[in-house]
Image (cartoon, rainbow, N blue to C red):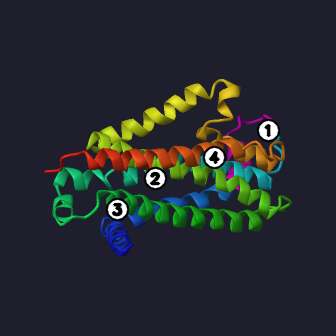
């Protein structure tokens, strides 16, 4: 346990030194700010772009529009940024051989994988929570709020859980391919396969990617319970990816 905690501290300090922590916080603060602001200003922007003489009527922006922007930005900017920022976290140490000194002293390799996973998880949690709270505060400031906090929190947890699976896929891809491009392709293919399978509704309800589609339905009140299966599937996928990453690293020659 002491070894794991020491490695975790090392990983967190490394993310500060390499600006990964700063990059995550800047990106997610931006998402938290821009989501309610874009929902508020969108009707004004569209009216300004309308051709002269055209009566352009839009319903006033609402609370749900702000959350729609938030989840859209998380799904696109947030998750993409998560993968890009952490794509070098494992591969750099493998390519540069910086793990050799630690492993030569008898460090269990599973501690390497777990420390990287939990350090990324802590940063992902902190950045996402910060973004959510900023979006929640500004949404409350700009709009009349009628959606319960419990409903909003439930909806917000789903993309967060999906992000955990992305972290595990990125780590597995890094260990398997030993390079940044390979890790990115591995994650992209994993998501693409889910997207293709999700075209069939009967399959979608079991896939982790369903967690990206459910939040808006929860906000609108049309779906309240059918997210439990993809949540379990996502945690199962995460566990399998971590176990596989440990298994591959244990059999890999690092020089």
Q: Nearer the viewer, residue 122 or 61?
A: 122
Label 4 SS: helix
Labels 3, 1: front one: 3
Residue at figure coordinates x 33%, y 74% from the top left: 6
Q: Which residue matches tag 2? A: 82
Nearer the viewer's eye, disc 2 or disc 4?
4
User: In the rendering, which numbered label is found on residue 56?
Assistant: 1
Q: Residue 189 sits in which quadrant?
A: top left
Query: Main SS of the magenta segment?
Result: helix
Query: Badge 3 local density, few (<14 within 10 Å), some, or many (20+)?
Result: some
- Picture quarter containing residue 20? bottom left
Q: CA distance from mark 3 to mark 4?
A: 25 Å
Which span is picked out in magenta?
38-55
Q: CA distance from mark 2 to mark 4?
A: 22 Å
Residue 18's spot in the image, x, y percent? 30, 65
In primary-sequence order, the first of circles 2 and 4 is 2
* Residue at the disc numbered 3: 111
* Tag 1 secondary structure: loop
Mark 4 or 1: in front is 4
Q: Nearer the viewer, mark 1 or mark 2?
A: 2
Against 131, residue 184 (above or below) is above
Q: Is residue 200 above or below residue 166?
A: above
SS for callout 2: helix
**Secondary structure state at the residue bearing disc 3:** helix
- Nearer to us: label 3 or label 2: 3
Mark number displayed over residue 232: 4
């Amino acid at each position: 346990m002491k070894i794991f905690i020491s490695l975790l501290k090392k990983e967190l300090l490394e993310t500060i030194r390499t600006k990964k922590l700063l990059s995550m916080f800047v990106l997610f603060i931006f998402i938290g700010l821009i989501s309610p602001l874009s929902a508020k200003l969108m009707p004004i922007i569209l009216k300004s772009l309308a051709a002269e003489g055209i009566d352009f009527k839009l319903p006033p922006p609402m609370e749900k529009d702000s959350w729609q922007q938030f989840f859209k930005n998380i799904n696109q900017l947030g998750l993409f940024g998560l993968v890009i920022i952490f794509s070098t976290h494992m591969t750099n140490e493998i390519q540069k051989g910086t793990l050799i000194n630690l492993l030569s002293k008898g460090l269990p390799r599973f501690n390497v994988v777990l420390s990287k996973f939990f350090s990324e998880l802590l940063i992902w949690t902190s950045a996402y929570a910060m973004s959510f709270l900023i979006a929640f505060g500004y949404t409350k400031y700009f709009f009349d709020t009628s959606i319960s906090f419990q409903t909003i929190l439930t909806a917000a947890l789903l993309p967060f859980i999906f992000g955990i699976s992305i972290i595990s896929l990125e780590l597995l891809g890094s260990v398997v391919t030993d390079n940044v491009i390979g890790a990115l392709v591995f994650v992209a293919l994993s998501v693409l396969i889910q997207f293709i399978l999700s075209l069939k509704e009967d399959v979608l309800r079991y896939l982790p990617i369903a967690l990206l589609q459910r939040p808006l339905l929860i906000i609108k009140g049309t779906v309240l319970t059918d997210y439990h299966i993809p949540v379990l599937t996502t945690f199962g996928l995460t566990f399998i990816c971590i176990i596989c990453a440990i298994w591959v690293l244990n059999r890999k020659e690092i020089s």
